[in-house]
Amino acid sequence: MASMDNSIIKGSLSKENRHAAGWTAHNMSSSSLRKKSDLTLVTKVRNRYLRMLLTNLQEVLLGTKLFVLFPAVALAIAAKCFNFGRPWVFALSALGLTPLAERISFLTEQISYFTSPTVGGLLNATCGNATELIIVIFALIEHKVDIVKYSLLGSILSELLLVLGCSLLCGGLVNLTNEQNFDKKQANVNLLLLLLALFCHTLPMMFRYAGESSGVTTEATLQLSRVNSIIMLIAYSAYLIFQLWTHKQFFEAQEEEDDDDLVSEESAVIGFWSGLVWLAGMTALTALLSEYLVGTIEDASESWGLSVSFISIILLPFVGNAAEHAGAIVFAFKNKLDICLGVAVGSATQISMFVVPLSVVLAWIMGIKMDLDLHLLETVSFALSIFVTAFTLQDGSSHYMKGLVLVLCYVVIGAFFFVSRSPNGAVNLDIRSSMAEIFRV
């Protein structure tokens, strides 16, 4: 017990230095769903190793309000092993990934207590989308490029319209008599990067439509997408430098007066090596459920009568970000919109500028042809979502009407993909032919 206590003391971190250790809006949002552990009974256990084990179990498994969903992990594995209906495997896997995603975020934070501010910041800035990355890898292994594209697009649309919309709507209704304001600097930087991402997606799509020979343009579009992906990763690296070092004051306003709202520790609650072991175990379970999820999505689509595009764009985004989504709404109730914007717009930026281009690069390494062409209607949905969000945030204030409009925009997009019955959500050939004729003229 003494060695564990010493390792935790070494990981102590004052609240004033949270940002230096890499705390972001995602961390704060996830913290709102955590519970303080009562270790009174555990401390009475005399055996040091048993006491350490029980402490870890209580902090890791019971330290979240989402612990009630952990049985879904075991049920998903049992459903797969005993050949239950594949749609059931898909549903249980999706449900089980929700607490796993939040716990990976928690364990990453615990490890960051024992690292330098630079390493801690990079860990928390890049591991916030670990679940999406794992799903992407397994989808690429099975050559399901369309699922990769549409699940990532769905995550972006969900963050910009649903999460931000629900936050502004709930916050506006609860604070009808109080004016809600936020710092526009952070939002402007994120929106600028989202416009760059849109630029990098639109040109490959237009290039394909304008091409004379489909064989030539397909290869050229692929090369252009890979170049654009590298540019996007460079831009995201610059964004990390901007966020963590040169202009970190833009991102510190969200931390003011948040001490009473977060279940956060001034020191790590588990040791460094314990955190690594738990992180490896949670990541392995996430990888297993992600494999189940990707392998059964077509069966779920056929059984439920829903298109793969609808499941990928509308349903899957709830899997990896449920904890952050709920946390953002909690902070909106408390009139802390800077954290809500950091979660919603910040997550959309991470996915569009980091996860998407990294997916293209990973596919390139694996010998899989994945480009940035999301197809016409999907790209238009992406563009309109960014424009609507930009107009919503332009004046630095909020009310419930802005949130309602964002939520309704998401409902419209969801309705489109619900009525779409094509297997991968692609636009039909008539639209493609018409667009190609327009560009030729």
Image (cartoon, helix red, strand yellow):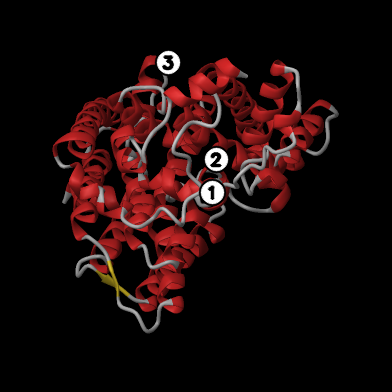
Find out whether the residues at labels 1 and 2 contact each other: C-beta distance under 8 Å.
Answer: yes
**Callout 3 environment at 10 Å: few (<14), some (14 to 19), or many (20+)?**
few
Mark 3, secondary structure of its residue: loop
Amino acid type of disc 1?
Ala
Mark 1, secondary structure of its residue: helix
User: Disc 2 or 3, which lies upstream in sequence?
Assistant: 2
User: Disc 1 or 2, which lies upstream in sequence?
Assistant: 2
User: Disc 3 or 1, which lies upstream in sequence?
Assistant: 1
Residue assigned mark 1: 323
Q: Height in image: 4 above or below 303?
A: above
Q: Height in image: 244 above or below 220?
A: below
Query: Which residue is painted at 50% across and 25% down in the image?
Result: 8
84 or 305, which is in the foreground? 84
**Callout 2 environment at 10 Å: few (<14), some (14 to 19), or many (20+)?**
many
Where is residue 413? Give x, y as percent. 45, 61
Quarter of the figure with the N terminus = top right
Query: Which residue is painted at 25% across and 54% down in the image?
Result: 253
146 or 105, which is in the foreground? 105
The answer to which image quadrant residue 75 occupies is top right
- Nearer mark to the viewer, of 2 and 3: 2
Residue assigned mark 2: 102
Where is residue 31? Give x, y as percent. 49, 47
Amino acid type of disc 2?
Glu
Residue assigned mark 3: 366
